[in-house]
Every structure is written in C-alpha cells, then in structure tokens.
Image (spheres, rainbow, N blue to C red):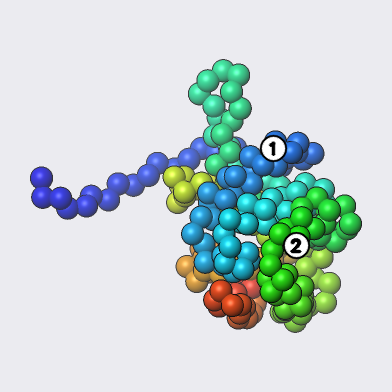
Amino acid sequence: MDGAAVAVKEEKLEVEVKRVENLTEEQILKVTDMLVKAFAGDPFGAILVGGNTSLSPIQLRATVAAANIGGTIHVATLPSSEAGEEDKIVGVAVWFAPGQSLNSTVEQRSAGWDAFMDVVDDETRRWWLEYFIPLMSITTTTVFGEGVVLRAWDLHLIGVLPEYQGRGAAGALMAYASTLAKETGAPMVLETQKEENVTIYSKLGFKVQGETLVESRVGKSRFWLLGKGF
C-alpha cells in the first residue's frame, strides 16, 4: 500500500423534502443544531456573531424561530431504518415566501432575535442595526427593485450535514422550492458569500444580479445576489 488517496464517489441520497410548520421548541432546537453543524467553520457565520462563535446557535435559532412564525421551513429527510424512529433530517432550507419577511413582526423578533441582540457585544449590535441590516436593505432594493424581494421566494439559510454534503440534498431542497415558486409565478432571490456557490446556483437557473462587500471588525465578505424567474 503506497498511501495514495483514492477518490470514492458518494452515492446520491434519496431524500424526501417537505415543509414543516408549527415546530415545538424541541424541534426548533433540532433544526438549529443541524444548521450549526452545517455551518461549522463558516467565516461569514463568525462575522454575524462578532467573532464569538459560541453565539452562533443563538443567531441561527433566531432565524429558525422567526421562520416558524412568519416564514417557510423545508427539510430534507432520510427514512429511518428502525420502526417507530423519526426520519433523519439531513438538510434544511429557510425561506421567506411571497408576503413574508424576516423579523417583520414583534412576534417574530421576540421569538429569538431580541435574545440574540441581548447577548452580543455593543459593537456587534451596532454593526447589525446601523450597518448590516441597512446595507442589505438598500442593496437588495437597488439590485432587485423596489418591493421585489417581498414578492419573491427569499432564501435565508440552506444547510446540509457535512457527512451528507455533495449528495443531492441541497439540490432537492432547491428543486422543491423552485416548483412552488413556478406554480405561483413568483421570482426567487438569494445571496451567497461563496464564489463556488455562484456556479452551483447558476446551474439551477439563477443569474447574478449584483454584488456588494460586507465589512466588519472580524473580516470582510463578498456578497453575490442572484435571482431567478424575473
């Protein structure tokens, strides 16, 4: 044996994608835990929490909890091999469908956002409120047009457990939402901080509409804004 690496092609997953609603706190935490694992080591995730990655579960839970109230959550699951056991969630996509938007109500914000704002340091809180949120609001309006995002399927999070990445779960989640968007004639919008994802989304029919640079004391991140169905 010479120690040379041998590439092994992973088998494509046969997942079921469905919308989940009215999640219990236990279910919210289960989805959040999956996303924490999916985004472990993500540089932009560190920016969102001011470099204190111990706060990432709180930040991700805030988005999941808000979507549970006024958004749309899709999960990709593998069927359980044991009778009576729940299907395993391997991927999650958090969308805000036409007419929905993140933290647009007191109820959504009190579900997790307010708690996140309470635990971050003052500089990170100011970064969110005075820089990042206004920047993204102005940028998305400039790039997509006034009111377009509110009429669109807006992707906020998509993540797959590391051991299942590259095996079709993310594509299945995107295809499921694309079908729903096509049925209603609504466009789809998303942002990505990874250049390699631009190629992946382009293969799914998305086109780059614009880009911006997000800066923070933790680091910088380039943002690509993509759309489909305009």
Q: Amino acid at mark 2?
A: Met
Considering the numbered disc 2 on the image, is that residue within a helix, a strand or a loop? helix
Residue 172 visible to an observer of this rendering: no
Q: Residues within 10 Å of mark 1 (few under 14, many from 20)?
A: few
Residue at the (53%, 49%) spot, across then down:
37
Query: Where in the figure is residue 104, as x and y percent of width and height?
Result: 85, 61
User: Label 2, on which residue?
Assistant: 117
Q: Nearer the viewer, mark 2 or mark 1?
A: 2
User: Label 1, on which residue?
Assistant: 27
Which comes sooner in the sequence, label 2 or label 1?
A: 1
Query: Where in the figure is residue 103, as x and y percent of width and height?
Result: 81, 60
Q: From the image, which quarter does the C terminus lie in?
A: bottom right
Residue at the (72%, 71%) spot, across then down:
122
Foreground of the two, 172 or 78: 78
Q: Is residue 166 left or right of residue 80?
A: left
Q: Is residue 199 left or right of residue 61?
A: left
Q: From the image, which quarter does the N terminus lie in?
A: top left
Cα distance in 3D space between marks 2 and 1: 23 Å
Residue at the (51%, 46%) spot, across then down:
161
Picture quadrant of residue 153: bottom right
Query: Where in the figure is residue 162, as x and y percent of width and height?
Result: 47, 49
Q: Amino acid at mark 1?
A: Gln
Q: Residues within 10 Å of mark 2 (few under 14, many from 20)?
A: many
